[in-house]
Structures are given as C-alpha cells and as structure tokens.
Amino acid sequence: MLDAKTFKCNSPVYLPGENIKGAVKVCPIQGKKFDHQGMQIEFIGKISKFHLANKLNPSEDSTFISSTRKLENATSHPSQVLVPFEFNSVEKPYETYKGELFSVTYTLKLTVIRNFASNIVKEEEVLVVVPVQEPKINSTVKMEFGLEDAVHVEFEMNKYKFHLKDCIVGKVYFHLLRVRSTTMSISIDKKETLGSVVDTKVMGEFEIMEGCSTRGETIPFRVFLSNYELSPSYARIGQTMSVKYFLNLSLEDDENRRFSKQIEIVFWRETLN
C-alpha cells in the first residue's frame, strides 16, 4: 500500500531552474507483499480557467507542462521502500497562483498499475516561485486630483515597484480644502483579467484621516505589504491572463461627495537568498 504521505519531496518550494527531486514511499501491510505491474510519475503544469459563478469547476484546463518518468517495472515489495524520482531541466515559467478567474498549478501525479485491482493514482501539489532582481528603474510617483474648487490634493509615493515584504511610504498634501469634514482612505486593489472578463478585489483598506483638515496640511502614511495576501504582478500569463495591482486613494466630504484617484503599482517577489 501507499501511505498518506506517499511523496517525500526534497523541498516544498521550487525555483524555475531547480530540479524536482523526491521519492515515493511504499509501505506494504505487515506480513504481505505489495505487488504491481509498473509505476510511473508525471510532473504536470496546468492553467485552469473559471467562471465567477462556479469557481469549483474549471471551465477550461490547459496543460503547459507534462513530463513522465518511469519508476519501476512490474515488481514485488516485501518491505517498506523509497523509490526515488527526479525531473531535470523541466521548464517552470509561471509562479503558482490561485485567483478568482484562473489558477496556475504544478502537480506530481503517481500511477501504480495493478493486475487484479484498480490502478492507484495519487497527486501532490508542488509550489513554484519566480523571484526576480530588484527593478533598476523605480522612481518617485506624484499625482494631483480633486473636484471643482472644493478639493485639490497632491499625492506622493517614494516609488511604485515593491517586493512583497516591502513598505509603501507616501504622503498626501492639501493644496485646497473648502469642505468642513473629510474622510480619507487608501486601498490596495487587485485586478485580475481573463480575456474580456475583469475581477477586482480589495486586498486591504485602511483610513488615514478622519475629521477636519486645513490647507497646507500633510498626511503621511505607511502600508506594510506583509500584512496582506498578495502575489507578484503579471502583465501576461499565457495569452489572455494578467494580474495587476492599484493603490486607490479615496476622499469623502461631509456632503457625501467622493473624490478618488488610483495609480498602478507593481509587486515583485524578492530574489531568494
């Protein structure tokens, strides 16, 4: 038999260029042999697309990697044994990702052929991360927004590209404020695109000001990204999929008028040491 912990992988997380190594653990029932007619393992990379109304069942699966290794011919195991496997130079172009519209997964699929019983099929997911070098160009961001002669705000960030454990540092400066009371908040919005379908999700939101403010006042803020479940930004996965993030600044006055402005920010996974 194969116990619940069938796979013993050398690492739970792999980089694009790393070989995937491990072993299959065969544990015969005491006093009995484990017989089979052949054993093979397959490494599968798959993109699954979903309808928002039914995320449990993919509307389309696309396999971009399929590599098979034969582990054993027909044999008999009288005692516990580890059967090693290794996938060398297998392309892993995308990071593991699970979203609302699509997912990218990597799976080890073991098949054991039996003579007088159903084949044994076991699957184990493998995580792939794609770290990148720090961007060379990462300049300060400034923008202005407002409405009529009521509000004029200048927004500034120290940069617009961040690794996933970074901190967004910025400030809001009031050039003009002719309202009595204001509430200002910042949110991180994820925009996932699959063809013409777009799903937007607020990943985090917090208030940076409430009450009266004055012309010339500066409101500093910090957003610690490690507090949120974020993925790297992807301009393109496959042909039609992307993941983008936006920082959305929203201001509401005492007459329930809302002013907002958003700017695209880029998240990247820091190179692993």
Image: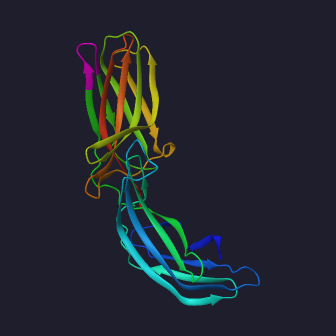
Q: Which residue is drawn at the image coordinates 43% and 59% (left, top)?
A: 96
- The reply to whether the magenta stretch includes residue 111 is no
Q: Nearer the viewer, residue 224 or 194?
A: 194
Q: Is residue 247 visible?
A: yes
Vertical arrangement, residue 20 with respect to residue 162, above or below: below
Instruction: Residue 205 in the image: state x and y as whole percent.
Output: 45, 32
Instruction: Residue 114 in the image: state x and y as whole percent.
Output: 57, 81
Hey, which residue is sitting farthest front in the picture?
116
Main SS category, magenta section: strand
Q: Nearer the viewer, residue 240 or 159?
A: 240
Hey, which residue is sitting farthest left in the picture?
148
Vertical arrangement, residue 58 with respect to residue 112, above or below: above
Q: Which residue is drawn at the image coordinates 38% and 49% (left, top)?
A: 50
Instruction: Residue 59 in the image: state x and y as whole percent.
Output: 37, 52
Instruction: Residue 168 in the image: state x and y as whole percent.
Output: 41, 40
Q: Which residue is drawn at the image coordinates 42% and 27% (left, top)?
A: 185
| Range covered by the magenta-colored residues | 145-152
Q: Which residue is drawn at the image coordinates 49% and 46% (left, top)?
A: 226
Left or right: residue 236 compared with residue 201: left
Q: How many labels does the image show?
A: 0
- The reply to whether the magenta stretch includes residue 148 is yes
Q: Which colour scheme is used?
A: rainbow
Q: In which quarter of the image is residue 251?
A: top left
Q: Which of 215 and 230 is in front in this view?
A: 230
Q: Quadrant of residue 145?
A: top left
Which quarter of the image is occupied by the N terminus?
bottom right
